[in-house]
Amino acid sequence: MSALTLTLKANGRPLKETIELLAVDVVREINRISRAQLVLIDGDLASRRFALSDSADFAPGQEIEVLARYEGDQAGNQTLFKGIVVGQRVEGGPQGTRLTVDLKDRAVRLTVGRQTRILNDKTDSQIMNRLIGDHGLKKGKIQATSLKHPELVQYQISDWDFLLLRAEANGLVVVNEDGQLSVVAPDATRPARHHIEAGLDELFDFEMRLDTSDQTSTVSAAAWDIRSQQLRGSANNRPVPLRQGQLKPGEITATAGSSSQIELDGVAAPQPEELQPWVDGTLLRQRLGLLQGRLSLSGSAAYRLLDPLTVSGIGRCFNGTALITALRQRLTTRHGWITDVQLGLSPQSFASRPDIQPPPAGGLLAGIRGLHIGLASDFKKDPDGQFRLQVRLYGDKELTVWARLAAPDAGKDHGFVFWPEANDEVVVGFVNEDPRQAVVLGSLFSQKNRVPPDLAPTENNLVRGLVTKKNNRLLIIDDDKAELLLKTSAGKEIHLNENEDSLTIKDEHGNEIVLDKDGIKLKSGKDLTLEASGKVEIKGQSVDLK
């Protein structure tokens, strides 16, 4: 093998050839930020100096480029990595002292901090271009998307994670290489760019595995369409071509004995057109995850992410063409240059990762998730004047919290106000999962706390209304001819009855006023007094006074 020469550049300037580089480790992977690590001889304990560590060349933020070439190779120097210094480590022992420098691609800028923004009337490709451009990175190929989102929210998530989520939603992957980002669809149908035959080519070691446990023949999704008020679905029955191994797409689930389809239901997609690319991407990840493995080859910078590579001589189950999904360049003084090529892709979606979301309660406390049951406590004035009530979570006095009351309408000097009674069962939620920010969302009926008889559920549910603890009631009978009844516990009543075409007002004393098609009737249980500050006139075709 020809001699290998490594060159380091700092901000475009070649570093001294006297620098002793022990090892270089470069990792590139789809949907990941490229990274590298350098190990150099550095440090003089006698003088107590680490010259390279102290120099500006390896200071955080400095751009480092790693180049390699074989002597006599016409291609000359080939860039293995270009990125910025993000960390250092010095160590010493019987074998001497050394400096380890950690590098990451400039795209690491997208991973810093969580952002919240509203994006209006943008396609996903426009959003991707903006994210990349905002961080001063080079744009590679950005797959065009046609669906325009009236509103898309990026909430408390890094720009990098948001970019990956939107790429995944469109069945795309992100490729990072030397300060450039591309967002493309994996194409398993392209002709192979590399051919490896075990036993003939220099293949140091390999590992391949077949796993059908995540494979289904069909992926379907459904979303609620608010326009049509219907559940709309999207199914993918189009086969994804497999060019590696002897299994055909239709044989995968039959071989594994698994379910024939996976359903991604309950998605509240504002636009059901979002479903098809999502479904396509899910099935593609499944197929790319069927065969996964690694090949260790003679070092070369010719391999690129998403290049099709054909491998043969490792059995019919694994022979064929697959996409390169990760690359590792290992260069050491002992073993020379080795390139590890990863084939296949994990079927797990990026959206399922738990670390995408911000920590509950802003990371200030352990969060409290979901909805919880509580019992309203006896009245106690809110010491902070925030109009809160006390709630015993699950009826435990030791778990009494102050909670705000959610209402259909609330504002300065107006609102819809119904305070829970003591020992009413209530539902409690927590703003941002913060246990200090409890909110009573509503109350619950049960076998113990029964629904008022007039409002019990029926087949037609015609009666709606309000009944207070003291049996004051407002009932609406929502039939073809509606009725409205307002009645106090003492017996005072106003009854609007379209069925009888009447309006009745009466009380517990036998007094009654009826307005109907026949006119107006006044009835008094005792005396009837008419009093006016001015005249009293009574007119009619006939006036009878008895």
Image (cartoon, grey):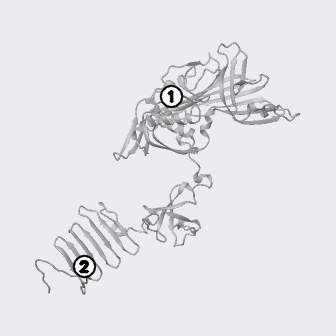
The outermost residue toward the right is 46
| Residue type indicated by callout 1 | Pro
Label 2–label 1 contact, CB within 8 A: no
- Residue 119 visible (yes or no): yes
Residue 269 drawn at (x, y percent): 42, 43
Q: Which residue is mark 2?
A: 512
Marks counted in the figure total 2
Q: Where 179 falls versus 376 (above or below)?
A: above
- What kind of element bears circle 2? strand
Q: Bin the neighbour count of mark 1 within 10 Å (Cα to Cα): few under 14, some 14-19, many 20 and up.
A: many
Between 257 and 65, the one nearer to me in the picture: 65
| Quarter in which the C terminus is drawn | bottom left
Q: Where 62 falls versus 394 (above or below)?
A: above
Between 360 and 93, the one nearer to me in the picture: 360
Q: Quadrant of residue 326?
A: top right
| Residue type indicated by callout 2 | Glu
Residue 2 drawn at (x, y percent): 71, 15
| Quarter in which the N terminus is drawn | top right
Q: Quadrant of residue 79?
A: top right
- What kind of element bears circle 1? loop
Residue 428 drawn at (x, y percent): 50, 61
Residue 377 drawn at (x, y percent): 52, 70
The outermost residue toward the front is 534
Q: Bin the neighbour count of mark 2 within 10 Å (Cα to Cα): few under 14, some 14-19, many 20 and up.
A: some
Q: Residue at x 75, y 36 (%)?
A: 89
Instruction: Kindly report the distance in space between the C-alpha atoms of the residues bearing marks 2 and 1.
Output: 81 Å
Q: Which residue is mark 1?
A: 186
Between 377 and 11, the one nearer to me in the picture: 11
Q: Nearer the viewer, mark 2 or mark 1?
A: 2
Q: Nearer the N terminus, badge 2 or badge 1?
A: 1
